[in-house]
Amino acid sequence: MKIGTRRTLRLVTAGTLLALMAACGTTYSVPKADPTFSSQASAMFAEEQNQATQRAGNRLSASAAASQFNRVARRVEPVAEEFCRKLTADREGFNCDIQILVDTEMPNRNAFQTYDRAGNPLVTFTLPMIADARNEHELAFVMGHEVGHHLAQHIKKKEQQAAVGAIIAGSLMAYAAAYDTSTPQHLKQQDINNAVMLGAAAGGHVYSQTYELESDVLGTYIAMWAGYDPVKGSLFFARPENPKEANGQLSFWGTHPPDEKRIATVLATVAEIEKKKGQ
Ligand SMILES: [Zn+2]
């Protein structure tokens, strides 16, 4: 099997990446906007948004798609774990036992990061998602991106923000209730509880653009280290897809809104890696 860019990308060794990580302080600092990358990203984005590009993309048979996925997962998983261990070497007990799994039930194209009951990080792909990938780079980049959410602890940070939000909402209600003598006490308490619930639910599953871009940077490192082309891979996120599924839930493109900034970030991160590699 031949992948055009693999030969050159393989030159990025663990040592180079470690040096890069040390050089930039926080590993997943998002590169600053650069007009060269922005205009390149904008052209690539426009091409992906074109329906003709989407129709021209290759789709494999179900069995070929499954073996393509297994191949990529076998390569990306150990690389992601090693990357995780190096990145978090100074954080005792950080769980780098990452598992890439397939959900055989979910009918929608989706990929997401969660934890099992024991707190182990999981990255799950649905079957329609696996079938829809046009190449290995897309699968590798999405895998790397989802692992990135774990490395940057986005779920935890989001839960903390939601908890703070819930407390604030609850406090506001309590404050309002305390000064409202016309409402019976038990109803006031119910309102406070509802406000807390609302605040928590508002946390949802959509990450901020900052978190998304952080994951893109980490995903770029992981995909590249595993020998894939993260730029090609990131085009999966640029498709002109409906942000909602038929059942009204957010689709993968609803939780990952397509935009040019994502591609520009990946381009800039690749350039950063290439530049350091040449030094
Ligand atoms: Zn994401």
Image (cartoon, rainbow, N blue to C red):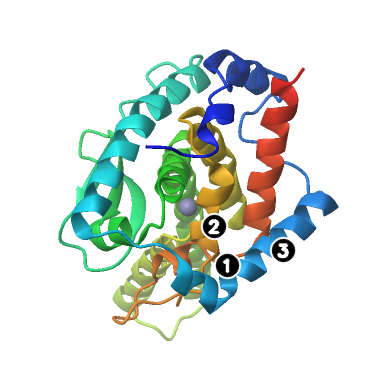
Mark before the other along the chain sequence, 3 or 2? 3
Q: Is any atom of residue 227 visible in this view? A: yes
Number of the label disc, if any, that sits on residue 178: none
Residue 44 position within the rendered picture, expressed as x and y whole percent measured from the top left: 66, 61
Q: Is any atom of residue 115 visible in this view? A: no
Residue topped by disc 2: 235
Q: Is residue 198 left or right of residue 62?
A: right
Mark before the other along the chain sequence, 3 or 1? 3
Q: Is mark 3 within 8 Å of ligand 1?
A: no
Q: In this rendering, is residue 241 above or below 210?
A: below
Q: In this rendering, is residue 249 above or below 69?
A: below
Tag 2 secondary structure: helix
Q: Is mark 2 within 8 Å of ligand 1?
A: no
The amino acid marked with disc number 3 is Ser
* Residue in the picture at 35% in, 54% down: 111
Mark before the other along the chain sequence, 2 or 1? 1
Residue 150 position within the rendered picture, expressed as x and y whole percent measured from the top left: 42, 38
Residue 11 position within the rendered picture, expressed as x and y whole percent measured from the top left: 58, 21
